Image (cartoon, rainbow, N blue to C red):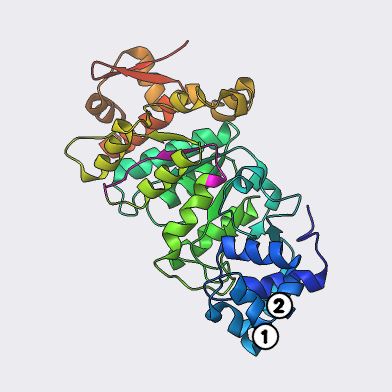
Amino acid sequence: MPPSSSHSPAELEARLRLHLLPELGPRRFRKLISAFGSASAALSAPASAWRSLGLPAMCAEPRRSAEIRQRAAAAMHWLDQTDQHLLMWDDPHYPALLAELADAPPLLFVGGDPMLLDAPQLAMVGSRRASRPGLDNAHAFARSLAAGGFVITSGLALGIDGAAHQGALDGGGKTVAVLGTGLECLYPARHKRLAAQIVERGGALVSELPLDCPPQASNFPRRNRIISGLSLGVLVVEASPSSGSLITARLAAEQGREVYAIPGSIHHPGARGCHQLIRDGATLVESIEHILEALRGWQTPSGQQASAVQPGAEQHPLLKLLHAAPHSSEALAHSSGWPLAQVLAALTELELDGLVCCEAGRWLARGP
């Protein structure tokens, strides 16, 4: 496990104070470090020197205030706890893919395993008000991709994000949640248990925001560049044309990452954003192979993937029916006695594992 920072405690505290100043984003933060050589020197410099760099007065004025000092001291205390870390853009353990961004966060607070941020990641995003099939797809794709060796990265939001995180955990894999709040202000509240599970099972919670930063609408689109920046590619599962997920996809394309989208019914509003992405050049995804084809070099060796997802698969009740004869979804529901929604979710899982396929509306077992 890496140290929280390679800098001295005094410089670390100074950077935390800079980070807390209003209107001081990544580019201004770096400008100050570049101009003065260190955060400590920047804090000691006169206000006129800050003005000469084009920084507004509201940046400089509160830097010596008691409130800023107290909040920085609280962050230092937070870093004393196990599994709580701070990565800085000039530290050796800062994630390499994210460091490529011109506006990469100067500070990243990490709860859990910070080394995971350099592992091969695939981002999965989509609607907060997702349909049941959309949630099932997100869970199934995340489960199989995580079992195949990818870290699943998303934003801990309701809907597709939550289903993706849970799918990764259910597949025995790791997942990273990038928050739009400080790590001490987990949002939404109903995902606090999920956040705890992510850390408990070797994943990570990440935020560029001060630990005590509450939910603010402007911060959620901003965190999307981190989700895409950490990842090799972004899969959009379900999204309306106005969805914030399309922002993540656009940022991914600008960052040179792969963009994938799952198509849906032309009558479903949640599919329109994905259809737009496909028209704009995103890869249309109908199975896990469509993603692995582009990312083959990053994948866990296929033998490991197969062993991760297939033990006991031949005993699946739907597979037994399909080995006997092809069935439609409705016929499988009738023969198995399962609700149709449960059958469709199970078929998605089996298809992602390469065990079944659908031809002319009928499902067939693949292989022996």
Instruction: From this view, report whether residue 155 is shown above or below residue 261.
Output: below
Query: Tag count in the figure?
Result: 2
Front in this rendered view, residue 166 or 333? 166
Residue beneath label 1, please?
64
Contact, mark 2 vs mark 1 (Cβ under 8 Å):
yes
Q: Secondary structure at mark 2?
A: helix
Amino acid type indicated by mark 1: Arg
Circle nearer the N terminus (2, 1): 2
Instruction: From this view, report whether residue 18 is shown above or below residue 281.
Output: below
Q: Residue placed farthest to the left in the image?
A: 267
| Range shown magenta | 229-241
Residue at coordinates 48% horizontally, 62% vertically from top-left?
Answer: 180
Residue beneath label 2, please?
43
Q: Residue placed farthest to the right in the image?
A: 8
Snapshot quadrant of residue 280: top left
* Whole-percent x, y for residue 99 in the image: 63, 48
* Whole-percent x, y for residue 71 in the image: 64, 80
Residue 119 placement, left or right of 315:
right
